[in-house]
Image (spheres, grey):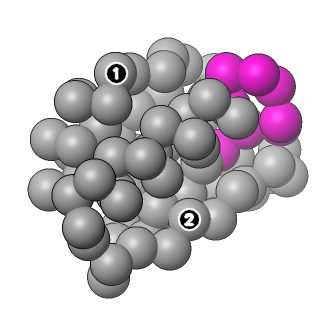
Amino acid sequence: MKDIKILGTGCPKCKKLEELAEKAAKELGIDYRIEKVTELNEIMDFGIMITPALVVNGKVEIAGKVPKTEDLKKILS
């Protein structure tokens, strides 16, 4: 199972990243769980200073941008 975390305070870009990550995971047919992390202290624990950010299985994959669905598929597969 992929553990996907969306780090961000709830801005439009954060919501878009969550939406695209879920779409990519569904299109890949993988088993996943998405968690939104909105608490600033938790976000900073990942070393993130700019959001949105994507963490997959504990590893920061993207920070500060919303990638295309195809790029997310590569990260998640």
- Disc 1 designates what residue? 68
* Residue 41 in the figure: left or right of residue 34: right
Closer to the chain start, of discs 1 and 2, is: 2
Figure quadrant of the N terminus: bottom left
Where residue 34 appears, x then y in whole percent? 56, 65
Amino acid residing under circle 2: Ile
- What is the crowding at mark 2: few (fewer than 14 residues within 10 Å), some, or many (at least 20)? some
Where residue 35 appears, x then y in whole percent? 64, 65
Where residue 3 appears, x then y in whole percent? 43, 71
Residue 14 quadrant: top right
The reply to whether residue 58 is in sight is: no
- Disc 2 designates what residue? 34
**From which residue to which does the magenta span run?**
7-14
> Do tag 1 and tag 2 residues touch (Cβ < 8 Å)?
no
Report helix, strand or loop for mark 1: loop
The reply to whether residue 61 is in sight is: yes
Give the numbered dot on residue 56: none
Mark 1 and mark 2: span between their CA atoms?
18 Å
Figure check: 69 above or below 1: above
Report helix, strand or loop for mark 2: strand
Q: Nearer the viewer, residue 21 or 51?
A: 21
- What is the crowding at mark 1: few (fewer than 14 residues within 10 Å), some, or many (at least 20)? few
Where residue 16 appears, x then y in whole percent? 62, 29
